[in-house]
Image: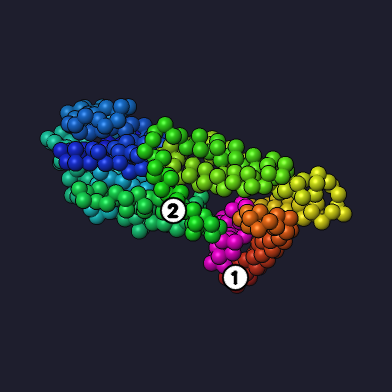
Amino acid sequence: MNIACILADTNYPLFADRTVYGLRFVERLQRQFREFKFDEVLFVSDLPSPTENMKSINIPDLIRFANNLDIQQDIRLFMVMSNVIMDDRLIKFTRDHNEDIQLTEQGGFVKLSGSNLKSFIHYLSQVKDISQLIDFTKKQKDPYSIKIVTPNNFDSYIEDLRLNFVPYYFQYEKDSDLRSIENQMYEANFKGTMDFIATYIYKYPVREITRFLSRYPSVNPNYITFLSILASFAVPSLFALGYMGLAVLTGWCMFIFDSVDGKLARLTVRLSRTAGIIEHATSAPAIFLWFAGLTWHFANGRFFAFDNINTIAGWTLMTLYWVDKTMCGIFRIKFKREIYDFAIIDKTFHLIACRRAIILLIVTVGYIAGLTESSFHFLAFWMVCSFVFHLLRLIWISASLSISNSHQT
C-alpha cells in the first residue's frame, strides 16, 4: 500500500499563485502520485486544499490515520513538501525500490516503510505542527535508516524518448525562476534522437505552444492527438488528388500536433495510454499511405504498371519503408535499443534519414521549386540510401558484438 502525504506550512501562500505548465505544485504532485497508482494522497496542512478532489487534513487527523494503519501489511509512506517539482522517474524509483529513501541532501521527499514507519508513527504522536514534519523530510536521526540518493545516482537514459537526461528535482523558493524550471522540464520530455527539423527548427516553437496551451485545462492532449491522426490520414488523399500544396500544409500541421500532444500530456500529467497506443498504431500505416497517395498521383492511377518509372519509385518507397521498419524492430528486440540511437554515427544519420519530417521536407522543396515529380524520384532514392545504411549498421554491429563476446568467452 502506497500513501503520499503532501506537506504545506505557513510558507505555502507564497507559492499558491505559482504554476508550472498550468498546474499548481500540489496539483502536479497529486496527479503524479495518482498516475503511479498510489492508494492514498493526503494534503497535510492547516490551510485549505488547493484542489477540489483532495481534502486538507491537520496533524491530529494524520495521527488518527497513521494509528489506524495495519503496520503488519506492506505499507510505504511518502512525505513530500508542497513546493517540490520532481521528475516522474524519481517517484517510480522510490516507489519500487526496497530501501527507504530521502531524495537529495536538502531533502523535501522521504519514503518510510517497515521499522522506519513504526518509529515514525510513534514520533508522530509528539508532532505539534506541520513544520516539524517538513523538517523531518530534510534530516533524519536515529533510529531511522534511510538512504540518501540524488538524481545523479539514477540511470539518465529514457528509453521511450531515446534521451539521456538526469531526472530533475526542484524545491521552489521565493525567487526561483519558474520559466527556467519549465524549460528544463521540457528538455526532459523532448526526444533525444530526432530528425534535424524537430531538433533544430520546431523544437522551441513547440515548447511555447505547449506552454500556452497548458494554461487552458479544457485543451485535452487527446484532442490534439485526434487532430494529428486526422491530418496524417488526410495527407495521402490530398496527395492522390493532386492537391500538393494543401497536402504539404496539412502535413506540417500534423507534425506540430504530433509533437505538442505528447509534451502537453506529460508536462500536465494527463497521459492516456489508449491515445498513445492508437497514435503509435496509426503512425506507420499513415506514412505508407502517403507513399501510396504520391504513387497514385504521379503514376496517374497506374498503380501496378511496372513499366512506369513513377510506379517503380512508389513501390520502392512502400516496400523499403516496411522492410526498414521491420529491420529496425528486429534490431531493437536484439539489442534493446533503437538502431538510430546506438552510436554517434547512427544519431547523426538519423538527423537526415528518410523518416516522416524529412519525407515531407523533400516533397515541400519539390513543390516550392516546381519539381514535384523529381522530388518524388529523389525520395525513392533517399529511402534506398536509408535502408542500405541501416542494413550495413545492423550487420556491422551484430558482427562486432559477436566477435567481442567470443573474445570474452
Q: Which residues are magenta?
A: 334-360
Res 337 quadrant in image:
bottom right
- Point out the frontmost of discs 1 and 2: 2
Question: Given the image, on which type of amino acid does mark 2 rest?
Answer: Tyr
Question: x%, y% of residue 208?
Answer: 41, 48
Question: x%, y% of residue 272?
Answer: 49, 36
Res 23 quadrant in image:
top left
Residue 340 against residue 250 in the figure, above or below:
below
Main SS of residues in magenta:
helix
Is 339 part of what is drawn in magenta?
yes
Confirm whether residue 348 shows in the render.
yes
- For image coordinates 49% across by 42% down, the residue present is 261
Q: Which mark is residue 404?
A: 1
Q: Nearer the viewer, residue 407 or 26?
A: 26
Q: Nearer the viewer, residue 189 or 17?
A: 17
Question: Quick one: quadrant of the C terminus?
Answer: bottom right
Residue receiving disc 2: 204
Give the Cα separation between the discs numbered 1 and 2: 41 Å
Instruction: State left or right for residue 344 relative to residue 305.
Output: left
- For image coordinates 60% across by 72% down, the residue present is 407
- For image coordinates 69% across by 40% down, the residue present is 237
> Which of pointers 1 and 2 lies earlier in the amino acid sequence?
2
Q: Which mark is residue 124?
A: none
Q: Tell me the crowding category of disc 1: few under 14, some 14 to 19, or many 20 or more residues within 10 angstroms, Cα based.
A: few
Q: Tell me the crowding category of disc 2: few under 14, some 14 to 19, or many 20 or more residues within 10 angstroms, Cα based.
A: some
Question: Quick one: quadrant of the N terminus?
Answer: top left
Question: x%, y% of residue 241?
Answer: 72, 41
Q: Nearer the viewer, residue 32 or 310?
A: 310
Is 69 part of what is drawn in magenta?
no
Question: Given the image, on which type of amino acid does mark 1 rest?
Answer: Ser
Disc 2 is placed on an element classified as helix
